[in-house]
Amino acid sequence: MTPGRILVVEDEDKLRRVIQLQLESAGYEVDGAPNAEQALPLASVANLVLTDLRLPGMDGLELIRQLQSRGSPAAVIVMTAHGSVDAAVDAMKLGAADFLQKPFSLEHLTTVVDKVIAAQALRDENRRLREELDHRYQFDNIIGRSAAMREIFHTVERVAPTRATVLLAGESGVGKDMIARAIHQHSPRNNRAFVKINCTALPENLMESELFGYEKGAFTGATASKPGKFEQADGGTAFLDEIGDVPGNIQVKLLRVLQERQFERLGSNITRNVDLRVIAATNVDLRAALEEGRFREDLYYRLNVVPISIPPLRERKEDIPFLAMHFIRKLASDLGSIVKDISPAAMDRLVSHSWPGNVRELENTIERSMVLASHEVLESSDIRIEPARNAAALESQQIPLLPEGETLEHWEQMMIREALRRANGNKSQAARMLGLTRNALRYRLSQMGLESGTADENGAA
């Protein structure tokens, strides 16, 4: 359909011809019909229907009703004789965009038609952009138009119907959780449980019982039997988030679940079978963990059947405008915010930021900006981005990397010992102070010959 195609419905041949010639001289393609019955088939290719209200047979009001019932996207302008304004009002109530009262000048005709065509084109463009955002660049609320994200969507569509194990890699905040849920939702298991297991949040001495369950009396405080996370995920999907934090003794049992779909509860010798799909995620380099001996090679290859690497937001900046608008629409009702849009200058500021916290940081920034904004369009001054540490400023101070005479190895050992002292020997707490995973700290302690002599997770010697 050509933008700007007009259908003129007028029973007076001379007037219809004059209108056609005027609109054609204004650059439009114009069709004509002497009555509504002949107009209806032609309306399917029109952007605008210009119709008289008084027509032989079906009148103009009924023509509008027929167009609406057929789902015609064409706008309608009605022409009415002097003294018939009430009929024009009725037409407007039915959805007509405007009306012309006869007699009208050709100049006025062109002005009204131009205005309605422009408004129709704007509505069509807005609808197209909404559809593009909602469908082409969206996958279960995961927004992305970059080549990397489109490839991820394609991989998700292909792997979801299978039971293949998937390993999601990417920095914190890139959306690994949402990708995992999308895989589950597009799988035959979507009507069964999706069980998320945050490996970082589970204390090491409780991880085995949480994953595999336990029987009554298996340990002090086990007053009743309890199924573990894998049993809860039977028939569905188990999502192991931050798999790199799983300690070595649990890795062996996890490998068996992946290989044989079998395990035993703590305190039981009864083997249980489970039918589940495993999706794992990590924000650390598991290959480096392999080299350091912190992660089992056989488990890595069992998990890495279908790897999906999710790039950080700073590497797919073309997604930021779509994400920003998605968050504005998503948060507007929840926050009761008046914000509906974002200015080009504000968008430029979002795109130029490095987003170390990735999509999660962007959403938080949009939410904070909307809460504090006082007008419908976010301006550059409304964007509340948390200030980042200025590495260039630190460098300009020329602070020495290490105290004179110190080696990196010795300095690292001093920091580890100090962290353990402040944490009263609690390795999990010390690891958090140092920005390490528990397993990374344990590996360094073993290299220092301290692993067996340090305190356990509860701080006991």
Image (cartoon, helix red, strand yellow):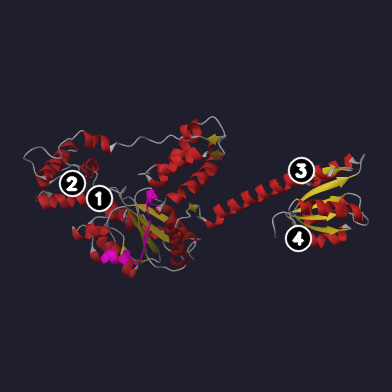
Which callout, 2 or 1, points at the residue further toward the start of the chain? 1
Q: Position of residue 245 (x, y in %)?
A: 27, 53
The amino acid at mark 1 is Asn
Residue on which the image places disc 3: 111
Q: Nearer the viewer, residue 72 or 220?
A: 72
Callout 1: few (<14), some (14-19), or many (20+) C-alpha neighbours within 10 Å? Answer: few
Looking at the image, is mark 2 or mark 4 nearer the viewer? 4
The amino acid at mark 4 is Ser
Distance in Å between CA atoms under marks 4 and 3: 24 Å
Looking at the image, is mark 4 or mark 3 nearer the viewer? 3
Q: Position of residue 120 (x, y in %)?
A: 70, 49
At mark 4, the secondary structure is: helix
Residue on which the image places disc 4: 44
Bounds of the magenta span?
298-315
Distance in Å between CA atoms under marks 2 and 1: 9 Å
At mark 1, the secondary structure is: helix
Which callout, 4 or 3, points at the residue further toward the start of the chain? 4
Q: Is residue 277 magenta?
A: no
The amino acid at mark 3 is Thr
Distance in Å between CA atoms under marks 4 and 1: 70 Å
Residue on which the image places disc 2: 456
Looking at the image, is mark 1 or mark 3 nearer the viewer? 3
Q: Disc 2 vs disc 1: Cβ atoms closer than 8 Å?
A: yes
